[in-house]
Image (cartoon, rainbow, N blue to C red):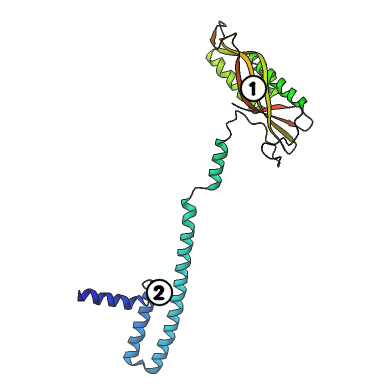
């Protein structure tokens, strides 16, 4: 116990000079100065020792400030490295919220109009065009008419539909739709991006749809005389003064 107490007292005395690089430097300078003084350097030696002591204090102060600076800088960087990149998280959320089958030519301009508003003022004539695009698209897909799809839809949507037709061909089947009828259409929102105008419409429609064997014509899926209903979200785009084209389909 006595040895432990003595060690504790010695540690307490040493801690006044610090325990790092500055403390070691100060202890060395102090011991060297005292040694010179005891060896008979006299008053001049003592004055030299004081000057050396002041220099040592300045050096220790600089070292201490530098250590604190780098320590604070390191502590400030750790939370940013440990956390998830907020921009990356936001991008992932956005991708997960857009399950659309195709997106047509981004405008690259500022969006005009709040979400959920009809910023461009969709007219009854526009709704008639949307219904025509619905019927024409189903007919072109049934005929596997690539040229007609290119006129009705943007390259992105036309490419997606062409891929579906290629898959059907590889399976040896063909999808046919007839008696397509729009049952209800509601404008969800419309907006502008640069020279482009967009309109998103909820479309509920009925049709007769079958999948047939390409060689025999036999029905492999669906019932010929039984109509089915579907509800999809269609987004249309047009340049100023041009006609509407299908830009995206969301089931």
Q: Quadrant of the N terminus?
A: bottom left
Q: Front-most of 173 and 95? A: 95
Q: Position of residue 61 (x, y in %)?
A: 45, 75
Look at 57% across and 31% down and name the residue there: 99
Distance between mark 1 and mark 2 Cα atoms? 79 Å
Based on the displayed image, in which of its 4 quarters is residue 109 positioned? Answer: top right
Report crowding for label 1: few under 14, some 14 to 19, many 20 or more residues within 10 A (C-alpha): some
Q: Quadrant of the C terminus?
A: top right
Based on the displayed image, in which of its 4 quarters is residue 19 positioned? Answer: bottom left
97 sits to left or right of 15: right
Question: Would you name the residue on which mark 1 appears?
Answer: 204
Q: Position of residue 42 (x, y in %)?
A: 37, 94
**Above or below, comparing residue 8 to residue 236 in the picture:** below
For the question of whether residue 26 can be seen, the reply is yes
**Above or below, comparing residue 224 to residue 66 in the picture:** above
Q: Position of residue 127 (x, y in %)?
A: 73, 25
Look at 44% across and 83% down and name the residue there: 54
Q: Nearer the viewer, mark 1 or mark 2?
A: 1
Report crowding for label 2: few under 14, some 14 to 19, many 20 or more residues within 10 A (C-alpha): many
Q: Earlier in the sequence, mark 1 or mark 2?
A: 2
**Above or below, comparing residue 34 to residue 92 in the picture:** below
Q: Front-most of 54 and 93? A: 93
Q: Residue furthest right?
A: 241
| SS under mark 1 | strand
Look at 33% across and 77% down and name the residue there: 14
| SS under mark 2 | helix
For the question of whether residue 147 can be seen, the reply is no
Q: Front-most of 62 and 149? A: 149
Question: Would you name the residue on which mark 2 appears?
Answer: 22
Look at 56% across and 43% down and name the residue there: 90
152 sits to left or right of 170: right
172 sits to left or right of 245: left
């Amino acid at each position: 116990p006595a040895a432990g107490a003595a060690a504790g007292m010695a540690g307490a005395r040493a801690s006044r000079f610090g325990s790092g690089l500055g403390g070691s430097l100060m202890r060395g300078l102090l011991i060297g100065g005292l040694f010179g003084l005891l060896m008979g350097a006299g008053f001049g030696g003592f004055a030299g020792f004081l000057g050396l002591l002041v220099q040592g204090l300045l050096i220790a102060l600089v070292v201490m400030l530098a250590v604190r600076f780098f320590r604070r800088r390191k502590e400030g960087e750790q939370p940013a490295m440990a956390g998830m990149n907020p921009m990356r998280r936001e991008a992932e959320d956005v991708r997960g919220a857009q399950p659309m089958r195709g997106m047509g030519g981004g405008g690259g301009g500022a969006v005009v109009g709040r979400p959920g508003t009809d910023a461009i003022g969709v007219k009854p004539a526009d709704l008639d065009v949307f219904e025509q695009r619905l019927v024409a698209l189903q007919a072109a897909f049934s005929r596997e008419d690539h040229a007609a799809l290119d006129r009705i839809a943007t390259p992105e949507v036309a490419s997606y539909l062409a891929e579906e037709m290629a898959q059907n061909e590889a399976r040896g089947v063909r999808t046919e739709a007839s008696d397509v009828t729009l049952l209800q259409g509601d404008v969800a929102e419309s907006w502008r991006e640069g020279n482009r105008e967009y309109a998103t419409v909820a479309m509920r429609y009925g049709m007769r749809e079958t999948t047939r064997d390409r060689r025999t014509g036999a029905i492999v899926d669906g019932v010929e005389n039984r109509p089915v209903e579907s509800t999809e979200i269609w987004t249309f785009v047009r340049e100023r003064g041009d006609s509407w084209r299908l830009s995206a389909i969301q089931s």
